[in-house]
Amino acid sequence: MLWTATVGALVLLILLIVFIAQNQHTVPLHYFAFDGQVSLGLALFIAAVIGGVLVAIAGAARIIQLRLQARFEQHRRAR
């Protein structure tokens, strides 16, 4: 199982490297005080990573919320 996950991750990494290598066109980027030129592949990669981090934060917050609710219900039933 571990080797399957490792091989899958390596395949995704190779596909990511190919994607970034094929999208080297520079595009203008304007974000708050930052103005500059960035390669398209890098800009899309950064956007995907930031999106993934935001989803992970939202998921972690929901898990914490559910655990607290379950703990509260368990203490309430014990009384």
Image (tube, rainbow, N blue to C red):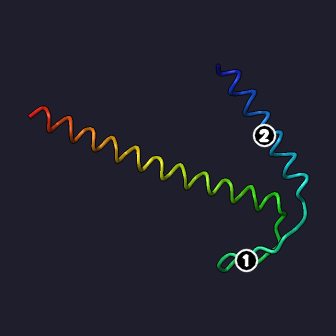
Name the residue rendered at 12%, 32% in the picture.
78
Query: Who comes first in sequence, dot 1 or dot 2?
Result: 2
Task: Give me the disc on residue 30.
Answer: 1
User: Which quadrant does the C terminus fall into?
Assistant: top left
Determine whether label 1 and label 2 are within 8 Å by CB. no
Amino acid type at mark 1: His
Side of 28 where 51 appears, left or right: left
Q: Is residue 47 above or below residue 17?
A: below
Side of 28 where 72 appears, left or right: left
Q: Residues within 10 Å of mark 1 (few under 14, many from 20)?
A: few
Numbered disc 2: secondary structure: helix
Numbered disc 1: secondary structure: strand
User: Which quadrant does the N terminus fall into?
Assistant: top right
Determine which quarter of the picture holds residue 45.
bottom right
Side of 73 where 58 appears, left or right: right
Residue 36's x, y, as percent? 79, 75
Q: Residues within 10 Å of mark 2 (few under 14, many from 20)?
A: few
Residue 71's x, y, as percent? 25, 38
Q: Which residue is mark 2?
A: 13
Residue 8's x, y, as percent? 74, 30
